[in-house]
Image (spheres, helix red, strand yellow):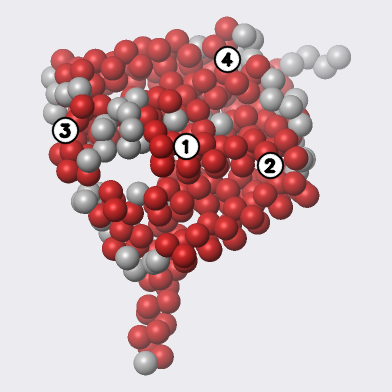
Amino acid sequence: MTTAAATHHPSLLRQYLALTKPRVTQLAVFCAVIGMFLAVPGLPDLGRAALATLGIWLLAAAAFSVNCLIERETDARMLRTARRATASGEISPPQVLLMAGVLGGAGMLVLYWGVNALTMWLTFASFVGYALIYTAILKPLTPQNIVIGGLSGAMPPALGWAAMADAVPAEAWVLVLIIFIWTPPHFWALALYRHHEYEKSGLPMLPVTHGQNFTQLHVLLYSVALFAASLLPFVIRMSGVAYLLAACALSGKFVWQAFDLYRHYSDARARKLFWYSILYLALLFAALLLDHWVGLILMPAP
């Protein structure tokens, strides 16, 4: 009996952890951390940055848990998500709500007492926007759900910036804009090669409601818009030539893959674009930070 309990306990912990969507959470927190480092001329207060990172992670994890709870019936009809503990019924709704409440409450306390009230309220607003407005209202209502609801998922750089500067200037909103435009082609690439599952789920995703060709075209158009948006940090002199070169290379590859997908569709090409889009965002924001540090090193002393 002891052995069985020992093997079951880690499995249950892994199931709870899976509800927080660790990979998505890591990318969101990474973008928030980049915002923290860009918000100050030198290194940020590392203690405050650590608390901000923890608080944002806790609230993001709570939001994803609520998302899994609301979508449990839909998830059960999709191969990709049917193994989630909420979809299989292994973790009950009250248990998920308790976990989300503990995580979210702890995150708000950490942000309020360890960072500032602005970051707490912005992060809480992102929680409401994603977990409730997007998941419960927009996603089952309109094929433009990911466009309209994308703002909440695009907020991490602004949250990180607010944590360090107690303000959200135009530079932070440029980073939000980049993620906002990145979200539709990223998600629609997934929806294209999973369109049979989304059709079965009953969700009005763009490939289901408007067809494959229409979605391919919109992936291409958004990728072109993303290329333009990725140049804005250089245009407003937030970054230098090093970032510009990285943005052109990364965004150029994004557009090329989207164009290739538009001309010759295959599930393999859609899957390739989806995975590249994740790498793209991480590398683009890393390039912003590296360019920022290079600028500080090369900046002449006053």
How far is the residue under mark 3 from the one under mark 1? 30 Å
Total numbered badges shown on the rendered structure? 4
Q: Are marks 3 and 1 in contact (CB under 8 Å)?
A: no
Q: Are marks 4 and 1 in contact (CB under 8 Å)?
A: no
Which of the two labelled residues, at mark 3 and mark 2, occupies the earlier sequence position?
Answer: 2
Residue 237 at x, y percent in the picture: 64, 10
Q: Is residue 108 left or right of residue 270?
A: right
For badge 4, the amino acid type reads Pro
- Mark 4, mark 1: which one is toward the viewer? 1
Residue 240 at x, y percent in the picture: 60, 13
Residue carrying label 4: 233
Which of the two labelled residues, at mark 3 and mark 1, occupies the earlier sequence position?
Answer: 1
Q: Give the residue displayed 22% in from the left and 44% down from the top.
A: 201
For badge 3, the amino acid type reads Asp
Front-most of residues 298 and 50: 50
Q: Are marks 3 and 2 in contact (CB under 8 Å)?
A: no
Residue carrying label 1: 133
Q: Secondary structure at mark 4?
A: helix
Q: Is residue 190 left or right of residue 95?
A: left
Q: Secondary structure at mark 3?
A: helix
Q: Quadrant of residue 299?
A: top right
Question: Is residue 14 in view from this perspective?
Answer: no
How far is the residue under mark 4 from the one under mark 2? 26 Å
Which of the two labelled residues, at mark 4 and mark 3, occupies the earlier sequence position?
Answer: 4
Residue carrying label 2: 120
For badge 1, the amino acid type reads Ile
Which label is found at residue 267? Answer: 3
